[in-house]
Amino acid sequence: MAGIPRHQGALISAGVLLGTGLGGFVDGILLHQLLQWHNMLSTRLPPTDLVAMKVNMFWDGLFHAFTWLVTAIGLGLLWRAGQRPEVPWSTRTFVGSLSMGWGLFNVVEGIIDHQLLGIHHVHPGAGQLAWDVGFLLFGALLVGAGWGLVRAGRKDTRPRGAPVTTTRERLVERRA
């Protein structure tokens, strides 16, 4: 990531992977299970009988296993970043990288699964293209907002363990 201080890379990598995994969980839990709008292969193999439902459930399970693995790797990277004193804990950097990861998930999944492979759509039926485009736009918005937060987080260089100062304390210091 050009322009991002090197010491923030560990926190950004962890956040992007965690965001990717958590974005996948939101998709899988909300759209696949709770709303039941689609399954992993529901356009290619509509879940209209027990066999098709089982096949879709199996592929949904593989999808959830993948998102779990990505999330676990992200947690491992976050743990390692926490062991490094030169990596500043920045809320903006971390939340921004989480947002970038979730958005990246939406964009990649939306392009590959919805458009190129056509294995499922966000909400099949009337208006499915609008739902697919909305999914992509939401992902792009998350990436953009996340990038902005990560860039703003470059200013967060306070070493870990240093006292947190309030805005009022900073103003008093400037006047002195």
Image (tube, grey):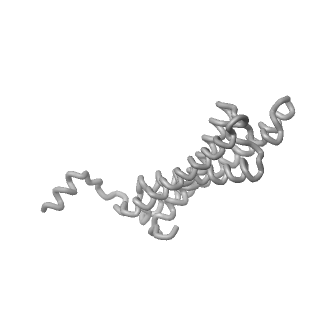
Q: Residue at x 65, y 31 (%)?
A: 35
Asked whether residue 50 appears in the rendered view, the answer is yes
Q: Nearer the viewer, residue 8 or 151?
A: 151
Q: Residue at x 54, y 57 (%)?
A: 14
- Residue 120, x across and y down, in percent: 74, 42
Q: Residue at x 51, y 59 (%)?
A: 12
- Residue 75, x across and y down, in percent: 56, 52
Above-or-below relation of 47 to 22: above
Is residue 18 found left or right of 84 in the rendered image? right
Q: Nearer the viewer, residue 107 or 130?
A: 130
Is residue 31 found left or right of 97 in the rendered image? right
- Residue 85, x across and y down, in percent: 42, 63
Q: Nearer the viewer, residue 130 or 149?
A: 130
Q: Quadrant of the C terminus?
A: bottom left
Q: How many marks?
A: 0
Q: Nearer the viewer, residue 56 or 141?
A: 141
